Amino acid sequence: MDPEWNDSQPIYRQVRDRVVAMILDGLLKEGDPLPSVRTVAADSRVNPLTVLKGYQQLVDEHLVESRRGRGMFINEGARDLLLKGERERFLAEEWPRVHALIQRLGLSPKELLDAAPPESKAAEEER
């Protein structure tokens, strides 16, 4: 995990968000162990209790399970659950602003697709 933190939200929340990003990006898969609290704390130079609080949020959200004496592991279905939540959040919070900006600038769907990064175009063509 990247040891750089920002001041916009508590560090434990940033720890949680980084694990979520790793799950969504496929770096952590169902059944994989999370990096140990001690390792993350040492690498990130934060208090282990801070890391544990971030991990506990993941447990509370049913994304991760704690196995006594073994560590924490990604739950089955965690990525699908995250994708559903992130998609809903995007459509409710970000899409209205993005859509308004697209309208304001008068951009066409073709212009948007032409401007998409090459990897996005390849994914779109596969559909």
Image (spheres, grey):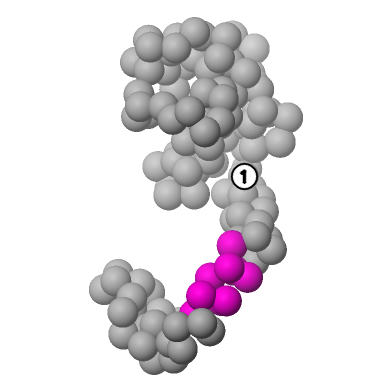
Give the residue at mark 1.
78
Q: Main secondary structure of the magenta part?
A: helix
Depth order, front residue of 95/105: 105
Tell which residue pokes out farthest to the left in this image: 118
- Asked if the magenta segment contains residue 55, the reply would be no
Neighbour class for label 1 at 10 Å: few (<14), some, many (≥20)?
many
Q: Which residues are magenta?
A: 94-102
Q: Residue at x 47, y 43 (%)?
A: 21
Please indicate, yes or no, whether residue 71 appears anywhere in the rendered image. no
Q: Secondary structure at mark 1?
A: helix
In the picture as drawn, the residue positioned furthest to the front comes out as 104
Asked if residue 67 lies left or right of residue 127, the reply is right
Image location (x, y in percent) of residue 112: 39, 82
Residue at 35% in and 72% down: 120
Say which residue appears at 51% left-offset and 75% top-offset.
101
Q: Position of residue 48 (x, y in %)?
A: 51, 9
Give the amino acid type for the residue marked by disc 1 in the picture.
Ala
For the point 64% across and 31% down, which residue is it? 58
